[in-house]
Amino acid sequence: MSQVVTIETVFDAFIDDQRHRVSARTIRNYEDVISLLRHSLNGYAYESLDAADAKRFGEAFEAGDEEAFCHLF
């Protein structure tokens, strides 16, 4: 069974991959930038979804997932 690739899993994979390549300070900077991007995506990107994806997002968000955009897409 294959894992679903989402924005969240890509962000996590990127950080995991970079940990052995760059300094701890750089990782912290990457994490800060990704956190800001994640916040922006979760707060605004849903506005451009088509009807079917907007429904999926809305249901997840209403169920309490405030980071639904990055978790679903």
Image: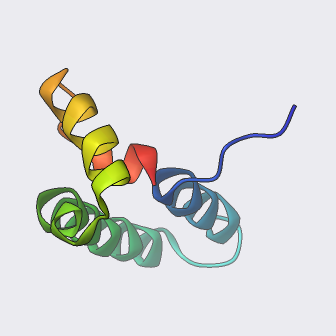
Q: Along the line of sight, which residue is nearer the eye, 38 or 5?
A: 5
**Considering only vertical position in the picture, is 54 above or below 29?**
above
Taking the image as shown, residue 29 lies to the left or right of residue 62, namely right
Residue 63, placed above or below residue 37: above
Viewer-nearest residue: 3 or 13: 3
Q: How is the image coloured?
A: rainbow
How many numbered badges does the structure rendering display? 0
Rendered location of residue 54, percent (x, y): 26, 51
**Residue depicted at x 47% and y 52%:** 8
Residue furthest front as drawn: 51
Residue at 63% in and 71% down: 18
The percent coordinates of residue 29 (x first, y second) are 34, 76
* Residue 73 place in picture, x, y as percent: 46, 55
Q: Is residue 6 left or right of residue 1?
A: left
- Residue lying farthest to the top in this orientation: 63
Which quadrant of the figure contains the N terminus? top right
- Residue at 21% x, 56% y is 42
Is 59 placed above or below 55 here? Answer: above
Left or right, 68 with reference to 23: left
Q: Quadrant of residue 67?
A: top left
* Residue closer to the observer: 49 or 12: 49
Location of residue 72 in the rendering, given as x and y in whole percent from the top left corner: 43, 45
